[in-house]
Image: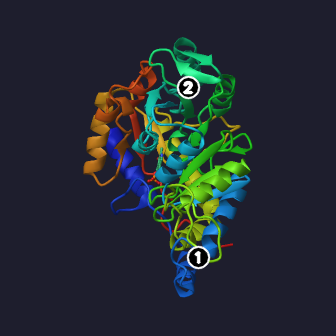
Amino acid sequence: MNKVFLKDFVEFSREIYGKDYIPLHRPIFEGNEKLYLNECIDSNFVSSVGKKVTEFEKNIAKYTGTKYAVATVNGTAALQVAIELSGVSAGDEVITQPLTFIATCNAISYAGATPNFVDVDRKTMGMSPTSLNKFLTKNCKIIKNKTINKVTGKIISACIPMHTFGIPCRIKEIKEICKEWGIPLIEDAAESLGSFVGNNHTGTFGEMATLSFNGNKLITTGGGGMIITNNKKLASKAKYITTTAKVPHEYKFIHDEVGYNFRLPNLNASLGCAQLERINDFLIEKEKVAKKWSSFFYQYNIKLVSTPSNNKQNHWLNTIILDSKKERDSFLKYTNKNGVMTRPVWELMPDLIMYKDCQNDGINNAKWLRDRVINIPSSVPNGTLTNIT
Ligand SMILES: *Cc1c(COP(=O)(O)O)cnc(C)c1O
């Protein structure tokens, strides 16, 4: 690979981010984080009961434009509960994409289900509605209102697309197909807080969606997650089973099913409330960085992966696609050796030992992307945020 290009890339990274080691994505705590954390500690309510958890839920619901939000200890737990509540039973199958973080598949496995992998689009890196439609038409039939996989004889009881690196997938078309087949749609929106399809936030198309507030995400609670939904029943059920399924009573401890201790602690929610106050500032600064990257790469005829202009992407992790695996590998090697963190995409799920026998549709685009995709530094640069307004 062209040595001048590699050297220029490292130099340009330093222009944006300075001379120290440059991570892919770092959290920013320049708002009310410490204030709210101190208030939380002083209140003694540091655990899963407390004002900030409810406030954080309300604010996330407002920001995403959903009616309800239920906070959880992390994004994986949110997915696990959403999958369970959507009606997935042990022995069922759940359709998802091969190009995703392991959490999506782990959550499917916790429900005792197995994933089927349908291919992604090259442009969005998220589930392809064309592939989904082909997979269902070729392999499935509807019997007594259930979608049955003729190959395995199992019920397909949910579909989980993911908005990869904050770029919205073609969720409207996916929604139509799921509706036609009667398959509940859950969006893994862990990476797409702040990304919109038209005027609608990602995660508002399915029955439920899940968010993550891990330390490397757009906003963080340390660890944390959220289920968002417009369905009141699902929301109250989610709250119930994530808080040990305790029957409300003045003093008695009665639980009427096996629940989880999955509620987000008030401490973490305090951090989240402060982070969410700054989300628009983060998004503005990240977009500026993306524009800089875009003009840099333009000179080399490389494009940043982007969404059509009627959508909005959060630029959580900026992504480039190089010409070959060989080019990708020399890029990774050079940049990481020179103090600029860059990363390939995850190993494809069907290539992992746990999922090697799961059905897939050939996943050609996912394989193509796997060899070429690189994430480049995408944090809000130091010192660019203005004071709280
Ligand atoms: C981050 C992430 C999750 C959730 O991860 P947690 O670390 O459990 O919060 C789920 N799916 C995807 C695609 C993610 O990137």
Q: Is residue 240 above or below residue 87?
A: below
**Which x, y percent locates residue 287?**
58, 51
Residue 387 visible in the picture: no
Q: Give the position of the C terminus as an image quadrant.
A: bottom right
What SS does tag 2 mark?
Answer: loop
Q: Is residue 104 above or below residue 96?
A: below
Disc 2 target residue: 128
Of residues 339 and 117, the one nearer the viewer is 117
Q: Earlier in the sequence, mark 2 or mark 1?
A: 1
Q: Which mark is residue 112?
A: none
Tell me whether circle 2 and circle 1 mark residues in contact (CB < 8 Å): no
Report the amino acid beneath label 1: Asn
Q: Residue at x 54, y 87 (%)?
A: 42
Q: Residue at x 57, y 78 (%)?
A: 36
Q: Residue at x 70, y 55 (%)?
A: 68
Disc 1 target residue: 32
In the image, is 111 to the left or to the right of 45? left
Report the amino acid beneath label 2: Ser
Of residues 133 and 164, the one nearer the viewer is 133
Closer mark to the observer between disc 2 and disc 1: 2
**Which x, y percent locates residue 314?**
58, 49
Dot 1 surroundings within 10 Å: few (below 14), some, or many (20 or more)? Answer: some
Q: Give the position of the N terminus as an image quadrant.
A: top left
What SS does tag 1 mark?
Answer: loop
Residue 52 visible in the picture: yes
Q: Residue at x 51, y 58 (%)?
A: 213
Of residues 180 and 300, the one nearer the viewer is 180
| Direction bottom: furthest residue | 42
**Quadrant of the image occupied by residue 332:** top left
Dot 2 surroundings within 10 Å: few (below 14), some, or many (20 or more)? Answer: many
